[in-house]
Image: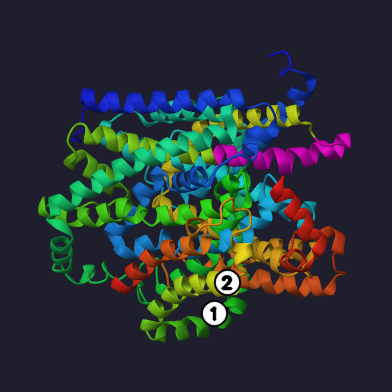
C-alpha cells in the first residue's frame, strides 16, 4: 500500500502564495510589451544580475533535482560534474567568445547568427533541431514533476498537475515574453535556493553531518568505494568515466550547451550592454556552483538515510520524492514544493520563450519571406510568437504522458542532446574563430556530423560507458571540425563584407567594425 | 482581438499546427517503448490517432535504418576507436585530475593574460575593481579548483 502525504494548510498557503505571486508578476510585465523586440529579447534592457539569476534557474529544472540526486544516489559525487566541470569553464568561454558576438550582431537567436555567418540552410536546420529538442524537454519537465514528484508524494493524478503547471506558466510567458520569464526567474531562484538549502541542511542533520555520512557510505561495501571520487576510472561501469567527463562534457558538451543553447544564451541577447551580457554569464556560473550542494548532496544523504531504515530504492529518480515524503516537516515541505515548482516553471517558461523566438525568427519568418518577399513586421512577429508559445505549451501538456515510457530521464535528455551538440559547436566555433569557414563547409559539417552521431550510437559497445553520450558528442565534434575545414578549403571564401563583425579577426583587426561596435555600445 | 483573427493569422495558425503535430508525432510510442515497456500507457487518441499510426510506421522504418547503419559501419568504425579506447583505459588516473584542474586554471590564465583588458570589460559603465570581469572570473573559478582538489 503506497503511503501518500497530506499537505498541511501551511504548506498549501506557501505554495498558493508562490503560484499566485509568479502568475501576477509575470502577467504584470505584459504591459511593457509593445513589439517583437520587447517580447523576444526584452527590448535589450536586462541588467547582469537578472540575466545571471535567469540563466541559473532556467538551466536547473525539477529534472535536475530528481535526476542529479538520483545519479548521486547511484553513482556518487561524479554526478555533480555536470554542474561544476560541465558549467564554469564553459560559461567563461561562452562569456568571452560567443556572447559578445551574439550580442553585437543584434540577433534574436543563435540559428539567426549562424544564418548570417553561413547561410539560411544552416540556420533552418539548426532551428528545427533546437525547436524539436525544446519540445521534448518541455514534455520531460512537465511529466517528471507531475509523475515522479507530485504523484509519488501526494498521489495527485499527474495529468492534472501537468495542466495546472502548463496553464500558469504558459499564460504569463504568453503575455510577457522574455521580460516575464526573467522577472519571475529572479523570484524563483530565491525560492529554489531557500527550499534546496533547507532540504540539504535537514538531510545532513539526519545523517549526522558530512563526515559521518561519508564514513557510513564508505563502510557500506565495495560498491560504494567510488562514491566520493569525482573523476572515475575509464573502465568504470557507470556512465561518467573521466575521459568522457573531461573531454566530452568539459570541452564539448558543456561549451555547446552554454554557447549554442538558445534557452541559455537568450537572456544575454537581451542585456543592456555587452558588459552586462558577459557579467551575467559569469555570475550565473558562480551561482551554479552551489547547485550540486542542493541537488547531489541530498542524493548521497539518501543512501545513509534509507539504509538506516532498511529501504532500498530500485528507481533512482524516486530518491528526492521519497526524501521529501519521509523527512520534511510541514512548512518546509511546502517550501520544498514551491522550490521544485520554481525550478520547473522557470525552465518551462525559459524554454517556451526561446523556442517561440527561434520558431518565429528562423523558421516562420524564412517561410514567410519565401512567399511574401518581405519579413514579418513587429506586430505580426509578436502575434506569431505568442501563438507558437500557446501551441507549444498545449502540445507539450497533451503529449507529456508519453515520457512515462522513458527510464533514467536525465541520461535520456543528455543522449538526445549529444546527437546535435558536437556538430553544432563545431560550426559555431569555426564560424567565429576562423574567417575561412564557408557556408558550404558549415552546412556539410553540420549534416554529416549529426549523421556521424547516429553511426556512433548504432555501433554497439564502441565506448567504455553504459550511456556513451559524452563520447559521442566529443567525437562528433572532432569529426565535424575536420569536415567543415576540408569543405571550406575546397569552396570559395566568404566576402569580407559578409563576415565583418561576425568573426574574431574581423573585430579585433578591422577598424570599420571596431568603430561601428563602439558606436553601438555608446548608443 | 479582431486584429489577431485575420486571414494572415489563420495561415500562421495552420502552419504552426502542422509543425507541432509533426514534431509531437515523431516523439510518439515506439521510440520511447524501446527503453521502457513495462508501463501501460494510454495514448491520447481523439483527433490525432492518424498521426500516431503514421508515426509508428515512420519509427519502424527508422529503427530498421539505424540497425542497418550500425551493421554497415561497425567494421569501419570499430578498428578506429578500439585502440583509442584501450589507450585511454590504460591512462594514468592522476591525469584525470590534472586535466580537470587544467581546464579551470587554464581558463583563468586565458582571461587574465590572453585577452586585452579592454576587450574583457568592454561596455562597463564604471571603471572600478568591482566591475573588472577578470576578478569575477577568478572568484567564480576558485571554489571549483578547491572542490576538484578535495575529491
Q: In this view, does B91 lie above or below A37?
A: below
The segment highlighted magenta reads A351-375
Q: In 3D space, how far apart are the residues under numbered discs 1 and 2 (Cα atoms)?
A: 10 Å
Residue A129's tag is none
Residue A523 % position (x, y): 72, 44
Q: Is residue A370 above or below residue B103?
A: above
Q: Residues within 10 Å of mark 1 (few under 14, many from 20)?
A: some
Q: Nearest the camera: A356 or A95? A: A95
Hey, which quadrant is residue A160 in on the image? top left
Q: Is residue A370 in the magenta section?
A: yes
Q: Nearest the camera: A28 or A520? A: A520
Magenta highlight: main SS: helix
Instruction: Please give the residue where the numbered disc 1 appears in the rendered image.
Output: B81
Hey, which quadrant is residue B139 in on the image? bottom left
Tag 2, which secondary structure?
Answer: helix
Horizontally, is A370 left or right of A261 in the view? right
Residue pictured at 85% horizontal, 40% vertical: A370
Horizontally, is B7 left or right of B31 in the view? right
Tag 1, which secondary structure?
Answer: helix
Residue B2 % position (x, y): 72, 13
Residue pictured at 63% horizontal, 39% vertical: A41
Which residue reaches farthest top?
B2
Residue A250 % position (x, y): 48, 67
Callout 1–callout 2 Cβ contact below 8 Å:
yes
Can the viewer see residue A401 in this picture?
Answer: no
Looking at the rendered image, the disc whose residue lies closer to the viewer, 1 or 2, is 2
Hey, which quadrant is residue A299 in on the image? bottom left
Residue A330 % position (x, y): 19, 32
Marks 1 and 2: same chain? no
Amino acid at each position: 500500500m503506497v503511503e501518500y502525504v497530506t499537505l498541511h494548510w501551511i504548506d498549501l498557503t506557501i505554495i498558493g502564495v508562490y503560484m499566485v505571486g509568479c502568475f501576477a508578476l509575470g502577467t504584470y510585465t505584459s504591459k511593457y510589451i509593445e513589439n517583437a523586440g520587447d517580447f523576444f529579447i526584452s527590448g535589450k534592457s536586462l541588467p547582469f544580475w537578472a540575466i545571471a539569476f535567469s540563466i541559473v534557474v532556467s538551466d536547473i529544472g525539477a529534472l535536475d533535482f530528481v535526476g542529479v540526486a538520483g545519479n548521486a544516489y547511484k553513482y556518487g559525487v561524479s554526478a555533480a560534474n555536470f554542474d561544476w566541470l560541465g558549467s564554469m569553464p564553459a560559461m567563461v568561454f561562452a562569456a568571452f567568445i560567443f556572447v559578445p558576438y551574439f550580442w553585437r550582431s543584434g540577433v534574436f537567436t543563435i540559428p539567426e547568427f549562424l544564418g548570417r555567418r553561413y547561410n539560411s540552410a544552416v540556420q533552418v536546420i539548426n532551428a528545427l533541431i533546437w525547436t524539436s529538442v525544446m519540445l521534448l524537454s518541455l514534455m520531460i519537465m512537465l511529466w517528471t514533476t507531475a509523475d515522479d514528484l507530485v504523484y509519488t508524494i501526494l498521489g495527485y493524478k499527474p495529468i492534472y498537475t501537468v495542466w495546472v503547471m502548463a496553464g500558469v506558466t504558459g499564460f504569463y510567458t504568453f503575455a510577457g515574453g522574455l521580460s516575464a520569464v526573467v522577472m519571475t526567474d529572479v523570484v524563483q531562484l530565491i525560492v529554489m535556493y531557500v527550499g534546496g538549502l533547507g532540504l540539504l541542511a535537514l538531510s545532513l542533520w539526519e545523517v549526522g553531518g558530512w563526515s559521518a555520512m561519508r564514513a557510513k557510505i564508505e563502510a557500506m561495501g565495495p560498491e560504494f568505494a567510488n562514491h566520493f571520487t569525482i573523476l572515475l576510472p575509464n573502465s568504470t561501469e557507470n556512465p561518467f568515466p573521466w575521459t568522457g567527463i573531461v573531454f566530452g562534457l568539459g570541452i564539448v558538451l558543456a561549451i555547446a550547451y552554454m554557447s549554442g543553447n538558445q534557452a541559455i544564451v537568450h537572456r544575454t541577447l537581451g542585456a543592456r550592454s555587452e558588459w552586462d551580457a558577459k557579467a551575467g554569464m559569469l555570475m550565473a556560473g558562480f551561482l551554479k556552483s552551489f547547485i550540486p550542494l542542493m541537488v547531489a548532496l541530498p542524493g548521497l544523504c539518501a543512501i545513509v538515510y534509507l539504509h538506516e531504515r532498511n529501504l532500498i530504492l530500485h528507481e533512482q529518480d524516486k530518491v528526492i520524492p521519497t526524501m521529501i515524503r519521509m523527512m520534511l516537516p510541514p512548512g518546509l515541505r511546502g517550501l520544498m514544493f514551491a522550490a521544485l515548482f520554481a525550478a520547473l516553471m522557470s525552465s518551462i517558461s525559459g524554454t517556451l520563450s526561446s523556442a517561440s523566438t527561434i520558431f518565429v525568427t528562423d523558421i516562420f519568418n524564412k517561410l514567410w519571406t519565401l512567399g511574401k518577399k518581405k519579413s514579418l513586421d513587429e506586430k505580426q512577429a509578436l502575434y506569431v510568437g505568442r501563438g507558437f508559445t500557446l501551441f507549444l505549451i498545449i502540445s507539450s501538456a497533451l503529449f507529456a504522458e508519453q515520457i512515462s515510457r522513458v527510464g533514467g530521464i536525465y541520461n535520456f535528455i543528455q543522449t538526445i542532446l549529444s546527437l546535435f551538440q558536437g556538430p553544432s559547436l563545431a560550426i559555431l566555433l569555426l564560424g567565429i574563430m576562423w574567417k575561412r569557414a564557408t557556408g558550404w563547409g558549415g552546412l556539410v559539417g553540420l549534416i554529416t556530423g549529426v549523421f556521424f552521431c547516429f553511426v556512433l550510437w548504432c555501433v554497439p559497445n564502441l565506448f567504455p560507458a553504459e550511456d556513451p553520450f559524452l563520447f559521442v558528442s566529443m567525437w562528433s565534434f572532432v569529426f565535424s571540425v575536420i569536415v567543415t575545414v576540408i569543405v571550406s578549403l575546397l569552396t570559395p571564401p566568404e566576402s569580407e563584407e559578409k563576415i565583418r563583425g561576425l568573426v574574431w579577426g574581423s573585430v579585433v583587426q578591422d577598424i570599420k567594425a571596431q568603430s561601428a561596435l563602439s558606436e553601438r555600445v555608446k548608443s | 482581438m479582431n486584429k489577431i483573427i485575420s486571414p494572415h493569422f489563420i495561415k500562421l495558425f495552420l502552419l504552426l499546427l502542422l509543425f507541432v503535430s509533426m514534431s509531437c508525432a515523431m516523439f510518439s510510442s515506439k521510440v520511447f517503448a524501446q527503453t521502457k515497456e513495462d508501463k501501460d500507457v494510454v495514448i491520447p487518441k481523439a483527433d490525432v490517432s492518424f498521426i500516431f499510426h503514421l508515426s509508428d510506421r515512420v519509427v519502424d522504418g527508422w529503427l530498421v535504418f539505424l540497425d542497418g547503419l550500425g551493421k554497415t559501419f561497425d567494421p569501419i568504425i570499430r578498428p578506429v576507436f578500439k585502440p583509442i579506447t584501450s589507450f585511454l583505459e590504460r591512462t594514468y588516473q592522476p591525469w584525470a585530475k590534472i586535466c580537470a584542474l587544467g581546464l579551470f586554471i587554464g581558463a583563468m590564465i586565458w582571461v587574465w593574460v590572453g585577452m586585452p583588458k579592454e576587450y574583457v570589460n568592454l561596455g562597463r559603465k564604471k571603471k572600478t575593481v568591482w566591475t573588472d570581469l577578470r576578478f569575477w572570473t577568478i572568484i567564480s573559478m576558485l571554489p571549483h579548483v578547491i572542490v576538484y582538489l578535495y575529491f
